[in-house]
Amino acid sequence: MKRPGAMPAGFVLPVVLGIILLAGLFAMHATTDAGTTMLLANQRQLQQAAFEAAESGAVAVAEQLAAGAAPQPVQHLDSGTPDRPVTVQTVVTARMMTAAGFSAGRVSSTDYEIRSTGRSVRRSEVTIVEGLRQMRAATAP
């Protein structure tokens, strides 16, 4: 004899299995989402390492210019770690000599374009392009 308002026999098992199935799907989605987030974070760290390597190359060339030396057209520099090589290309884009009477002394300027490419593991690569102007006293003619 059935009680009034009682659930039909065999109804609880499918409901419990459905709840377990939904919990499993949520857990699988959360695991996949966490894995994707970890991959993106790792890739961001590699890009940052490549950027730092490229920046170190641009700074090295700027220091060469500040010391008065003319940098080589192509340089392969060490960024401090073996897995982060740096290639720096330096191109002279303009040379100008200020005419006499327009400055306290005769001044020459040289404009450089510096392309510094830093690399990291997993093919992460960043290129920084900077323009620098080197001003110095011109030699007497």
Image (cartoon, rainbow, N blue to C red):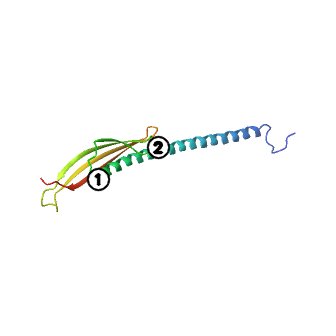
Find disc 2 in the rendering and name its residue. Answer: 46
Quarter in which the N terminus is drawn: top right
Residue 52 horizontal/vertical position (percent) = 42, 48
| Alpha-carbon span between mark 1 and mark 2 | 32 Å
- Mark 1, Cα crowd under 10 Å, few <14 / some 14-19 / many 20+, is few
Find disc 1 in the rendering and name its residue. Answer: 67
Q: As displayed, is residue 22 above or below residue 62? A: above
Determine whether the residue tagged by mark 1 lies in a helix, strand or loop.
Answer: loop
Foreground of the two, 102 or 81: 81
Q: As displayed, is residue 121 above or below residue 111? A: above
Give the residue type that dot 2 points to: Leu
Residue 133 is left or right of residue 138, and the answer is right
Foreground of the two, 12 or 114: 114
Q: Residue at x 12, y 58 (%)?
A: 100
Q: Residue at x 72, y 38 (%)?
A: 17
Residue 118 horizontal/vertical position (percent) = 39, 43
Residue 18 horizontal/vertical position (percent) = 70, 39
Q: Residue at x 34, y 49 (%)?
A: 60
Determine whether the residue tagged by mark 2 lies in a helix, strand or loop.
Answer: helix
User: Number of callouts in the render?
Assistant: 2
Q: Residue furthest right?
A: 1
Which is more foreground, mark 1 or mark 2? 1
Q: Say whether disc 1 or disc 2 marks the residue closer to the N-terminus.
A: 2
- Mark 2, Cα crowd under 10 Å, few <14 / some 14-19 / many 20+, is some
Give the residue type that dot 1 points to: Ala
